[in-house]
Amino acid sequence: MTKVMWEKKISSFLVGKTIKTTRYFNDKEMGLFGWDDEYSKRPLVIFFNDGSWIVPMMDDEGNDGGALAVSDEKLSTIPVM
């Protein structure tokens, strides 16, 4: 898939959504992703008003949770726990 195709697909998923709530993954979600050992990082999950969600991952294979860079001077990074 080309960069333009990815951008269209991502935009169609994200544009226009409203964030309903955010929180860190709970134990059940950690287990569903296979991140339930003592070395796994607990990522932030963002839930949207339509029931969809998004969560940062370490890599394309989903090997662990990841931090988010933020464009705010007071909150430059949302860490994993």
Image: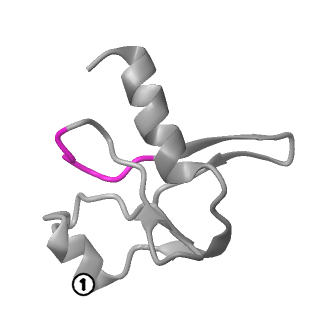
Point out the image quarter for the N terminus. Answer: top left
Q: Is residue 2 left or right of residue 24?
A: left
Span highlighted in magenta in the image: 61-66
Q: Secondary structure at mark 1?
A: helix
Q: Is residue 15 left or right of residue 81?
A: right
Q: Residue at position x 52%, y 75% from top? A: 50
Q: Position of residue 20 (x, y in %)?
A: 64, 77
- 54 w.r.t. 5: above or below: below
Q: Residue at position x 63%, y 62% from top? A: 17
Q: Residue at position x 21%, y 66% from top? A: 38
Q: Position of residue 56 (x, y in %)?
A: 42, 50
Pick the front one: 35 or 21: 21
Chosen colour scheme: one colour
Q: Specify few, some or many for label 1: CA neighbours under 10 Å numbering under 14, 14-19, or 20 or more.
A: few
Residue type pointed to by label 1: Lys
Pick the front one: 29 or 9: 9
Q: Is residue 76 magenta?
A: no
Residue position marked by numbered label 1 in the rendering: 28
Furthest-right residue in this view:
73
Q: Is residue 65 magenta?
A: yes
Q: Residue at position x 20%, y 63% from top? A: 35
Pick the front one: 76 or 53: 53
